[in-house]
Amino acid sequence: MSGPCSYDRPRRIRRGAALTLFLAGVLATGAATGTWSEGDRGAAERPAPARAASGGRVPEAATADRAAVERAASEAVEDGKSGAQAAADVVSRSGDRWSTIYSAGEFKDFQAQLDGGYVGVGLWVRQAPHGRIEVSRVQPGGPAARAGIAVGDRLRAVDGRPSRGAPVTEVVARLRGVATGGSRQPAAAAGTPVTLDLQRGTRRWSATLHRTRLRSHNVVVDRPAGAHGPTRVKISAFGKGTGAVVRRAVRRASPQGGMLLDLRGNTGGLVTEAVATASAFLDGGLVATYDVRGSQRALYARRGGNTHIPLVVLVDGGTMSAAELLSGALQDRGRALVVGSRTFGKGSVQMPSTLADGSVAELTVGHYRTPSGRNVDGDGLTPDVVVGSGAEKRARTVLSGLGGGA
């Protein structure tokens, strides 16, 4: 695996071997994360400079105790019970909203997602108020889209099992047919059915979909019809290869037209890919700092990016995690103007470790900051130009003012 990614995970997880910035909602699951492999870390990560690491103190939040989680899992396995369930119980009692326990089956399936392919119904979900689960994204041409399911629909149950109050990862596992609870049962194959109970307003209905093999299309590039118009790049999540796609789009874009980078609704993804995307617009330099149990580290862009093309970044309340890391870096470095509404505010750091039954615990160990030292977790980012409806039209106007064609 190459480059930082928000949902890419290392092919093998050894205890403490990979650092995870849990900066979003999982790519195709609504609980996105960001990770490095052992090889990726050396290229973009170094000790943080003192000035960047000295930003305002991050307010303390509930965190799960790693030793307690691992002890609970080991004891459960010795008693013939589910280590993943025991670990999840400890995390739940801790009040840590971002730490997560993945079964071995879920983790393996997530790895496939990060490589851009998965078996499912083309449905992304997120946690809504009062424990409800709602649709956050529908993949065009997938089973869910063909069934008429739309963003905002409430997912009441999957195969008769209520979704309300269930963790997003568990709901997604049911949709995908991925084994939970530490089971090593393989994921459901393409062609297998899954029945969804849905609600839109006062209408309630059920739909039986058949899973299929899908490819994640996380980057859409819209080039102008004319020679000098702006290029729009929409990134829905940072999957494997996102940075390379953006870099190609920058090379082909009109310098006069500029670029509109749309990160609205981006739930995060592979941190390495967020850094690679920043590198397309920066000539090296700091992207973010983060702390791991008091140890300050930093992420740096690679040299050689295009520092001249006019750039505007679009964000909203659904811009999370790795997308906030990228937005904050481009804003702090003076490389782009950010337009839209305040972002979500997900900037905590998780460290993964393998439990006794093969499940994986990703537990909060710290937080990241933008190059100027701003805390993101719980605060989000304030755009340079705050606007609600009509944000893209306003962004194009701003881009025109920077010298890019509208």
Image (cartoon, rainbow, N blue to C red):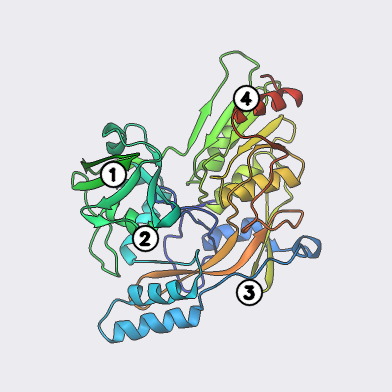
Label whose residue precedes the other's in the sequence (3 or 2): 2
Which sits earlier in the primary sequence, circle 4 or circle 1?
1
Q: Position of residue 146 (x, y in %)?
A: 27, 32
Question: Could you tell me if the residues under marks 2 and 4 are in contact, i.e. CB atoms within 8 Å?
Answer: no
Real-space CA distance between mark 3 and mark 1, rounded to the nearest whole angstrom:
42 Å
Label 4 sits on residue: 393
Secondary structure beneath dot 2 equals: loop
Badge 2: how crowded within 10 Å, few (<14), some, or many (20+)?
Answer: some
Callouts 3 and 2 close, C-beta under 8 Å? no
Q: Which mark is residue 165?
A: 2
Q: Earlier in the sequence, mark 3 or mark 1?
A: 1
Relative to 247, residue 39 above or below: below
Q: Earlier in the sequence, mark 1 or mark 2?
A: 2
Q: Which residue is mark 3?
A: 293
The label nearer to you, 4 versus 3, is 4
Looking at the picture, does residue 179 appear above or below residue 357?
above
Seen at 56% across and 72% down, the residue is: 62
